Image (cartoon, rainbow, N blue to C red):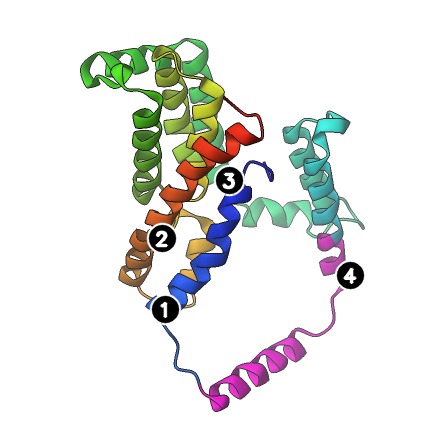
Amino acid sequence: WLVLGIPMLVLVVITPIIVYYMYRPVESSENKIKVKEHAIEELKKMGPLTVKEKTALSIFVFVLILFVTDIWTKIPIGAIAILAMILSILPKIGIIEASKATKVVEWPVILWLGAAISIANVAASEKVFTFLGNFLLVHSGIVKMGVVVFAIVLTIFSVYLHAISPGYTAFAVSILPITLAISQAGHFNMIDFGLLAIFSMGVGAFFFPFNSAPNMIMYGYNYYTQRDMFKAGLVLSIPTIIMLLVSFFYWWPIIGIWK
């Protein structure tokens, strides 16, 4: 994934630059001093890391290592997630009591996502999405498109459709199977276009606060409005689409993903 996304690192560099010039802050030596003093004061209030905080950090690093090394350990991703949950609630080791965890965890959201993913899997196994893809192809003419046109349409579609999506999972469950079905029906390489769809989803969640959890967290600080975020999202969508297509047509063939 890291190698695939190397061209996207350009976005990591230019995004803060674009946002800075769109919403340039008022700079002064006085402001810089106040910001530094505020940061120091907040760190003092937080105090040193507690035992539970150190434990949480250790569990996070341990799980992250397992995620990264799954290609060698062969441990399923789902099993790693369950292991993290168990470690978090183990008596004398975990960071939260099981009785409290049942009250703070958003179980309806978890159950909804689990149900959505399960339904998508069943639908895929029963070739529902393949049928839907074939049906759309007959009426849309996408099957007549070449690789270049289809890649451009798919990228634009995925990036901008994310504006109405409440998070990554629901979007992926809804869109990715259809993308794969259309690719298969159009005799395009499913792996190539599946990766393109995934990358498009991953970098397109910048239009509204509800598009991702980090958006909601930052929006909660009340530093900007939804209009500000949407305006920045529209501007950022242009270099995002360009770099996605550069990755697909130029970088991925170089590293041997497709020819």
Q: Amino acid at mark 2?
A: Leu
Of circles 3 and 1, which is in front? 1
- CA–CA distance in space, label 3 to label 1: 41 Å
Q: Secondary structure at mark 2?
A: helix
Q: Which residue is mark 4?
A: 51
Give the mark nearest the N terminus, 1 or 4. 1
* Res. 21 mark: 1
Q: Amino acid at mark 4?
A: Val
- CA–CA distance in space, label 2 to label 4: 41 Å
Q: Amino acid at mark 3?
A: Trp
Picture residue at 43% right of the left edge, 64% below the top: 17
Q: Nearer the viewer, residue 181 or 18?
A: 18
Picture residue at 76% right of the left edge, 51% below the top: 58
- Relative horizontal placement of residue 64, taking residue 210 as reference (left or right): right
Taking 163 as reference, is 30 above or below it?
below
Taking 248 as reference, is 206 above or below it?
below
Q: Secondary structure at mark 4?
A: helix
Give the mark nearest the N terminus, 2 or 3. 3
* x, y percent for residue 157: 30, 34
Q: Which residue is mark 2?
A: 236
Q: Amino acid at mark 1?
A: Tyr
Disc 1, disc 4: CB below 8 Å? no
Give the mark nearest the N terminus, 3 or 1. 1
- CA–CA distance in space, label 1 to label 4: 42 Å
Viewer can see residue 220? no
Taking 107 as reference, is 47 above or below it?
below
- Relative horizontal placement of residue 218, taking residue 91 as reference (left or right): left
Residue 29 falls inside the magenta stretch: yes
Q: Which residues are magenta?
A: 28-57
Give the mark nearest the N terminus, 2 or 1. 1
